[in-house]
Every structure is written in structure tokens, then in C-alpha cells.
Amino acid sequence: MPNDYALVFPGQGSQYVGMGQDLWEQSPAARAVFAQADDVLAFPLSKLCFAGPEEVLRETANAQPAILVVSLAALAALEEAAGERLSPLFTAGHSLGEFTALVAAGALSGADALRLVRRRGELMSAAGQERPGAMAAVLGADDAAVEEACAEAAEAGTVIVANYNAPGQVVISGDPAAVARAGEVAKAKGARRVMALAVSGAFHSPLMAYAVRPFRGAVAECQIADPRVPVVGNVTATPLRTAAEVRDELTRQITSPVCWSRSVEYMAEHGAGQFVEVGPGRVLTGLAKRTHSVRTANVDDVAAARALAAEWRAGV
């Protein structure tokens, strides 16, 4: 098996009704993951993934554990197809996906990750009600120009770059009036397009401060081990190597920007020649291709898991 690949895991927004059903039907290992999730959370999360309704699945408190469990099920199916535990060069996840990356790296148990993510989703949703916010994707402008636009819009309220996704693709987050103003300034500075996002709060911004203290308490109650492989963190875009670093990252991440493009660059520059997105959607492989010249693969069903495992065994 190769050892020059990174496993990357998607975040909120990748959910869709029907996700994971093929995994449940065709992979005993994946089915066990869904069964554990339903038991840990004491409600039929698997049914919500497979059948919806969409408006309930989309709710932050549900979408986050749903994406986590489908990603873990896809990882289980990939390891089942490979016939061994995977040993990637790095793991990483976009926002919520960081929890899946920590499970893949042995730092968190699947059960604790589910409990944390469920609590995180509840707290982030509550923070959005406590202080309503907005987010918008800004396309076709460099990072510095968007940062300048946010600074110029500060008189209208709080607004920051929340996601550095790829060159020419960032997301801004904050008070609605400030986000709207920053979008206007960004377009004046040459941004090709600004799109409002359908979200329940200003994620990865200071407006999420309401969630930080109770979530720190939830993290403190969980057993966290040193990762067995480096997990490239969202906040620093460098490897998390100790349990203490993981605890700090998970708390800081709620109000800090997701430095995804820098994370991709770090992994590619330190030997990751292939990025394997495990879970629903194909967002992260697209961002990786825009950021660096790398090979990519997606594993969201059993056929994809078996095909990738066969390629690895053949040395492709």
C-alpha cells in the first residue's frame, strides 16, 4: 500500500438525502458505523441520512453528525476493501471534517467524535440565534484584497475571512450588514462574484463566541490521545501531534478561520502526492486541484472504495 497520500474529510454543506445508503447496504464495516451512531445519539441518524427530510438533515445540529458518520462509514468501507488499517501521510478535515480526521488518526474514538460534533452543532446553532450572522463566498479575488474589503467594511460591524478555501475562493463571515458591505467592496476591488450562503450563523468568526466556553467543557470531558499520524489543523495549517494541541485546536477552531488552502499546500509540500476525499461530496478534491498539482480520488460508496484499494494494491 502507498504511504504518500493524505486522507481529507468534508465539512458542513456536503450533506444530501440518500448519502451513505450504498455504504450501509454493501459494507458490513460501514453498517456497524451507522449502528453505533444511532445508538450513541439515541435517534435514527442513519434514517435521516438515507431518507431525510432534507430540511431536517440540513439543520446544523443534524448535518454535522450526519456528515461525520457517513465519512466514518466510507473510511470503514475503504479499510475493509484494503484489508488493513490505513496509514496515510497526513489526515485533515475542513471545519467539521477535522473531527473525522482525528478519528482516522486515532486521536478520538468514533463515539466521542459523534457526541462532540452533535454538541458542537447544537452550540453553533444556538450561537447563531444569540447573535445572528451571515456568510458569503467571494470568488475571483486574491486573499489580500478580500481581507482589505473586510477591514474597510468594519464600520458596519464584524466581518472576517472565515474560510481560505483555494486561490480565488474564500468565504467571509460576520454581521449581516458588514458581510454585505465587504462583498460590495470586494467586487469593487475586482472580485468576479459574491454569493450569500444559506447558513444558520456566522461560522468561524467572533460571532460564534457564545459556543466556545461550553464546547471547551465538552472537549475536556473526552478522552483524546496523541494522533498516530499528523493531523493538519485548520487554525494553524500545521500538524497537530499531541492531545494538548488537539484540545486547543478544537476549541479555537469555532471562532477562527479555516486555513484550508495553506493546509493543502503544507501536505503537498511535505510529500502528499494524492489527496483522497472520504465522505459525501467532492468539494475538497476540487479545492486541492485548484491549490496544488496533486492526484485526487473520492470515496463515497463501496465501488469507489474497492476501486481505490485495487489501484493501491496494483501500485497505480
Image (cartoon, helix red, strand yellow):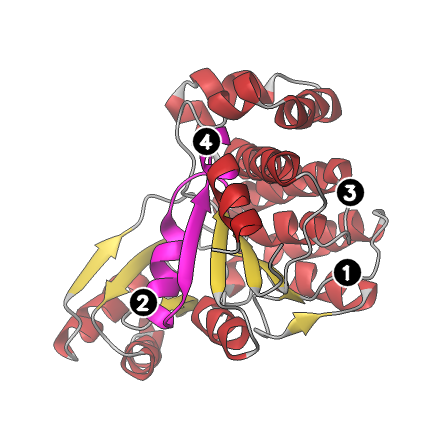
Q: Amino acid at mark 3?
A: Ser
Q: CA distance from mark 4 to mark 3?
A: 26 Å
Residue 80, position in %: x, y? Answer: 65, 34
Q: SS of the residue at dot 2?
A: helix
Q: Which residue is mark 2?
A: 290
- Residue 212: image tag: none
Q: Earlier in the sequence, mark 1 or mark 3?
A: 3
Whole-Å distance between the Cαs marked 1 and 4? Answer: 29 Å
Specify whether residue 9 is in view: no
Q: Which residues are magenta?
A: 278-305
Q: CA distance from mark 3 to mark 2?
A: 32 Å
The residue shown at (62%, 64%) is: 90
What is the number of the mark on residue 303?
Answer: 4
* Residue 293 colored in magenta in the image: yes
Classify 263 as above or below 53. below
**Image disc number at residue 109:** 3
Judging by the rendered image, the residue that carries numbered circle 1 is: 227
